[in-house]
Structure formats: structure tokens, C-alpha cells
Amino acid sequence: MLMLVLSGMRTRWITFVGSFVALALGVGLIAATGLALAATFDAPERGPERFAAAPVVVRAADHLRVDTPTGTRTKPLDHPGPVGPRTADRLAALGRTVEDRTFPADVTADPAGADAKEPRTDPGAEAARTGVDAKEPRTGPGAEAARTGVDAKEPRTGPGAKAARTGADSGKSRPGQEAEVRVGHPWSVAAAAPYRLTSGRAPAAPGEVVVTTRPGGAPLRTGDRVLVRTPAGNAPRTVVGTVAGRGFEDAVFFTDDEAARISPDIDALVVHADATAVRRALGPDSGMDVLTGHDRRRADPDPDRDARALVSVNALLGTAAGITLFVSAAVVASTFSYAVAQRRREFGLLRTAGATPGQIRRTVCAEAVLVGVLASAAGVWLGAGGAPLLVGRMTEAGLAPPWFALGDASWPLHTAFWTGVFVATAGALASCHRAGRTAPTEALREAAVDSRVMPASRWAAAVLVLLAGLGLPAVALAFDPGDLLGRKSYITRPMLLVVGCALLAPVLVRPVGRLLTWLPARLPGATGVLVRENTAAGVRRTAAVAAPVLITVALAATLTGTVATLEEARAAEARTATTADYVVTPGQEGRPLAPAFVERARAVEGAVVSVSRSTAVTVLEEDTALVTSEARAVDPARLAAVSELPVTAGRLSDLDDGTIVVNEEWLTTRVGDRVTVWLGDGRKASLRIAAVLATGTGDNGVYVTRRNAGGAGVDRIDVKVAEGADRRAVAAALHSAGAATGTRVTTRAEWLAANGPGPNDPTRTGLRMILGIALLCTATALANTLVMATSDRGRDLAVLRLAGATVPQVLRLVAAEAVVAVGVGAVLGGLVAAVNLLVVWGALVLLGVMSAVVVPWGTLGLVVAAAALLAAVAAVLPASFALRTRPVELAGARE
């Protein structure tokens, strides 16, 4: 048996080389993505950073804990509260305490001297006045710097005034005046990191600061004058010392008194006492966390940033691995199926010579296992070498954090190897059953016409898979349309339809092929007729070429089309919901707007200003699960002036401190019912439902009032120009205030464009990577199948030559047949994609979002064109080699 297998493989080496390459490539891709995926399971183990030298850190609990009948449930709080003064006083009795405060403190490294000559008695107090009284006369360039942009038309002189005015008229910063994003702390807490002075001294007066230095940052040195922007306003300050940065933050240290004036709340407390005594003094229900040892990391800035950064990487690589496995399995199964179909006469001869059906089946399985083992081993070697390249490319493209690196896991290599062997064996099982049924009379067949290409078992499998592929979305549309918009759904759902169409491909090839060749067959010449007839006669060959194209076109159109359609739907929702003329957001994401800007915006004549805050509310669903929803805290009286939300029940005007606006995803959606929620700071509240919003694409969240914001700061202002007001004056006032406080003021159109996806959006980049993997598998399958098919058609090509066809005519015929086969796959893949996109559109309509379906014609054109070009080349090259032999010799050759 082994000698027979080896002999057959040596004779038909082209067939097995094609299968080997396809499987090796698939295993290599699975191994590479598996190694990268394994590296995402554990974030880097980092110790405490900000409080690495602190014995005990006390801060407000950052997790909500709720007791339920099934146990205690926890959820992160959106806005943990501060440490209260009474708590601080109680702990001060145990030992020395240090109060930590954290607040924005952006630095302009070169404020053109700010006020290097004229002394100021209290720069902190002056800074606090910034923008509050724009008309009050002030003298001195330092005061002028503090009221940057208040009166753009007022004559000003002096370099300091000019620097302070930078961007006041246009709202844009000039070169050299960009503020460096930093955070402020009191100097006493610097020892908790620990920070050590590298030059100068500690700050001792309100106008003095110590700054961290880092490579690539602003070259700040002791003695420099800088303009520091804090929540209390802008003020020039003197750098009296520097400390080496520790990598996790860029800090500015103030005196303890000035830090307390800028940010009165205590964010954390360093306690030099025994942790047990601290816990005993606080009591069990204090709402405070006592952090020691490794737990001190929870008080670091964004302690979960590493794990959160890996979530999207994990999802991307998991999707890539799944699609690679799916495409590889389909390609290998199609390749083995066609290889068996090619060998009908060979199996017929073996049956004539006395071979039993079981022997034929064992031969095919043995060949598949041998190819699977060899190809999987080669694929594992390729994957191990390609994984570092994949990780490097992902970090360069911004899909993974810069520190992301491969680990030492070996299980992905074992998984990839045995997956390859299993795929090869499974792909051959259906084919070997058909091979065992080959009759001895097949050896006498001269015609290459395929007949009865669809056995009953394949019909049954195709129908079942198609019913599942169509039935599951239908059920979701009826009961939960929103589930169809999730990434897992729109990535996995097309696979059932793809498999179903691939199983039906032998039946669909003839009608689709005739449709595509209808016009060419009516043109002068015999090429069109021959292409039509050869496509119809060689159903298995055409189906084998069309299968990988079908898969790739369906995935490309479905994935990119669904993402683009959802993006358009979200953009349509935003355009409808936001009717403001201007949208104001912080210059740095995640920060609140400067209080000075909020006050000045509210004072702009002719502007209807709606101030809102990002927060969250949590509910306990069915007494088992805590579910957190994003929320916005708004002023109900101003909300209607700047937005048109999709209300399905109730009225937005009924929103007050005792009510809440929810969306249709909530379990309780009847207006007037009360719901128990936990606010962003952990407070429990019972609120009455005032209105219900349509679910939409998921961006219609919850609305509450400022009282229920859970301590959130203002992070967005929507501005509507009142009727009859001077639009230019309103815009100038907003831009002027924005330039003074580092606030981003945009028109509605600019805000919509900025918040939409761009060409380098991580989602789009990830999809391009996934589609590149699928296209690579498709290219390999196309090349393999066409080389196998064309190499086996030597006698057909010789007959055409003997009938009078020239070599160029034969090659054009071969290329045309290959392109038509690609066209068949593209049409079938397009039908699959059309069904999936219609499902997405139907889900959006049911969710109340009217948006057009976005078809990625450009992507589809590139995929189909690349596949057609590759198919033509892969068919013409072996045909040109075959035609070098004399036609008489080819026509008389026997297999």
C-alpha cells in the first residue's frame, strides 16, 4: 500500500505539490496568528508606579459591589469619589499622611518670556481669574497672558502680549506654542513614586514648579519660565527644579497649598502606618480601598491600560485565525475533491485490475495523511518564522501597542500542526468515499464531461447549511435585531452561506457560466462558444476554481460592506441627533473642559449653550448581572435646542433629577416605571423613566441630569446660534475662548468628520489584514487548481491545435475559461454578500435607523481583478509549456 501511495504521488506530483502548498500556507498562517494570539492572553506584569515607595495608599473604592441571590457582583465605577476630609483627619492620627491630587497641567515651554521682568505677588490668584471678567483693566504682560484671546481687537504691544495672543483670532496655535500635555501633583507626593531631584530645588512659592524630563520632550531646565494651564486658569510660572521622568506620566509638581487650591478634592492618601490599623480605623463600610503591596498599582494612572490595549488585538487575531482556518479548510477540501475527480480513470484502472473500493479509499486517505503531515510540518516552520513579522507589522500599523511582543508559548504550533493534519484528512474523507465508488468502466471513458456531480448526500448537506444560514438571521431579525450588528455575528454569519453555496457550486456553475458567456458566445469567432461549452462540460474544474473566489469575494464584500454600512448608519444617527452649530470638546481626550471656558461660553451673547458630561449608570438585571450603560448628564431645558433624539415613548422635557431617559435595550422600558440604578460614583438611586429612545446602532445611551452625573466633569458643549444672532460674532467668541484654554471648537460638520472613521482607522486596518490573509489563501488555491487542471488537459489542447487553432488562440481560450471561472465565483460570492448586507440593512430598519447599504465596489473590483489576473497567468503558463510538445504526440498520449 505504501509503495502504491508513493508511486502515485511521484506520478501525479503536480497535484500533490498544489495540495502541499495550499495546506502549508494555511497551517503557517494559523501558527503565526496563534503565536501572536497566545501573547495577548496575559498583559505584562507591571508593579506599582506612582506609589511604588508608599507603604499604604487609601483611595475611594473604584468598583461597585452589589450582593445578589447568586453572590456578590462587581463592576468598575466610572467616577470614584474623593477621600473625604474627615477620613483624612481620622487617618492622620495614625501616622504621617500625604494628600495626592491629580489635575491637568499643560505646559507651553516657550511663552515668549511670559513675564520675566515684572514681579507678580500672587500668580495663582490671577490665574484663577482668567476669563471671569474680561473687561476689567489689567496691567503687565503677565496679566495679558492670563486673559489670552479675550479681546482680539484690542491693541496690544510687547512680545509677551503677542505670544499670549497666539491663535486668539483663528483658534489655532502657531509653531513653537503647542502646549505639552501634563498632569499636576503636590510636591509632597513626589516621594511616593519616588521622584528625585536631578537639578534645582523643591517648589516653595505659588509661582514655582518642578517638572519631569524625558527624551523627546520639551527641553525644560531649571530657571525656565513656562505658561501652565490648569483648571484654575493660565499663569506663567518658574521652573525651580527637574526630576527624571519614570515613563508612566509627564508631571508638574506644585506646592501643596497651590495644588489644594487648584484641585481641592483629595484623590488618594499616602499613609505611613500599619495597614491593619488603617483598615480598623476606616471600618468595613467606609467605601475606601486600602492598597498595599502589588495592589498599589490600582492607584496608578490607568492601571488596566495594558490589558485593555490587548482586547482589540485579541479580537483581531482571533478573527484572523478563525477566517484563516475556515478558508484553508475550504480550499484544501476543494483541492482534494478536484484531485480525486481528476483521477477517475486511474481509479477505474485499479478497479479493473482487482482493487476493492476499500483499498481505493485507504489509498486516498493515506495520500492525504502523508501530504497533511509533511505540509503541516512545513507550515509550522513557516509560522514560527512569520509570527515576529506579523507582530512587527501590527505594532507599526498601530493595531497593537508598541510593547506587544511574542511570548514563549508552544501550544499554537502543536495546534496548527494537528489542525493541518485533521483538515487534510477531513478534506479527503468525502473524496475518498467517491473514489471508492468508481466503477471499472471509468477506465474506458474518453470524454471529460462531468455527469452527476452532485450526490444525494451533498444535496442534503447543502440544503441544511443554507437553511441554517438563512434561518438564523431570520430568527434574529424577529427577536433581537441588534444582535446582528455585533462583530462576532457579521463575521461568522456569512460562513454558513459560503459553505452552502460552495456545496451547491457544481449545480450553479452551468447556469451562471452560461449567463456570463451569453454575449461572448454570440460574437464572431469560436472562442466564446468554446468557453461556454468547456465551462459547462468541466463543471468540477470550474467549481474548483470558483470556490476560493466565492469565499474571498463573499468575505470581502460582507466584512467591508457591513462595517461601512454600520459606520454610515452611525453617521446618519449623529447627523440627525446633533443639530448644534458648534460642538466643543477638550483638546485632550479623557479630560474635562476647562471651567474658564465653560463660563465664557455661557456668557457668549446669541449662543444657546448645552453643557453635558459623560457618565455611566449600572442596573442589576434579573437579580443576577450588573449591566453598565454609557450615559450623558445634560440640562433638560437646553437639550431639545441642540438635538433631535429618536424618542419612541415619553418626553425628553420630563427629564429631571428624579427621572432618567433609557433606550429600548433596557429590560424596563415603560414610561413611569421606576428603576434602581447605581450612578457613576457608586451612589444608589431610584429613578422614574421619563422617555425611551430607539436602540439604533447602540449609540443612543442613557440621559440623566447633572445631579446624577456621579461627579463627572463637563466634556462636551453643544452650541446653537440663536435666531437673529450674529453667527460670526458667536464663532469668534468661541474660538477666542478656546484658544485661551486649549479647547477644541469645531463646527457641526467638522465634528462629524473628525468622529467618523478614517482610512487608517484600526477597524479598517484590521479588516485589510484579515482580507489580505484570505486573498493569499485564494491566490494559492487558484494557482494550484489551475496548474493541476491545465496540466491535465494536454490532449484537449492538442486536439484544438490539430483542428487548426494557433498557439495564441489556444492560450487566449485557456485564459478566457479561467477568467469565466473566476467570474462564476465572483457572482456567487456577490449573491452571498448581498444576502448578508440585506440582513444588516433589515436589522437597522427594525432598530429605527434609515441608512443606505454601502457596497465596497472598489474593494470588490480589486479582489476580482487580482483573482482574474492570477487565474489567467496560472492557466496560461502550464498551457504554454504543454503546447511545446508536438500536437500529434499529445493527442496520442494515454494517461
Image (tube, rainbow, N blue to C red):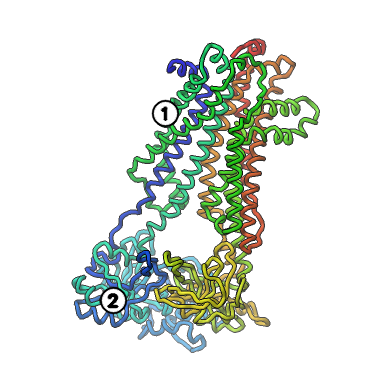
What is the x, y in percent for residue 543? 62, 32
As shown in the figure, which amino acid type bears the numbered disc 2? Answer: Glu
818 in relation to 634, above or below:
above
Disc 1, disc 2: CB below 8 Å?
Answer: no
* Quarter the C terminus occupies: top right
Characterize the local packing of mark 2: few (<14), some (14-19) or many (20 or more) Cα atoms within 10 angstroms.
many
* Quarter the N terminus occupies: top left
Residue 735, image quadrant? bottom right
What is the x, y in percent for residue 866? 61, 38
Q: Nearer the viewer, residue 410 or 224?
A: 410
Q: Say which residue label 2 marks.
A: 99
582 in relation to 430, above or below:
below
Q: Say which residue label 1 marks.
A: 373
Characterize the local packing of mark 1: few (<14), some (14-19) or many (20 or more) Cα atoms within 10 angstroms.
many
Residue 795, image quadrant? top right
Question: Is residue 474 rendered to the left or right of residue 57?
Answer: right
Q: What secondary structure is marked by label 1?
A: helix
Q: Nearer the viewer, residue 160 or 518?
A: 518
What is the x, y in percent for residue 712? 44, 75
Residue 265 shows up from this direction: yes
Q: Sequence order check: which comes first, mark 1 or mark 2? A: 2
Q: Nearer the viewer, residue 301 or 350?
A: 350
Q: Nearer the viewer, residue 263 or 703?
A: 703
Labels in figure, total: 2
Q: What secondary structure is marked by label 2?
A: strand
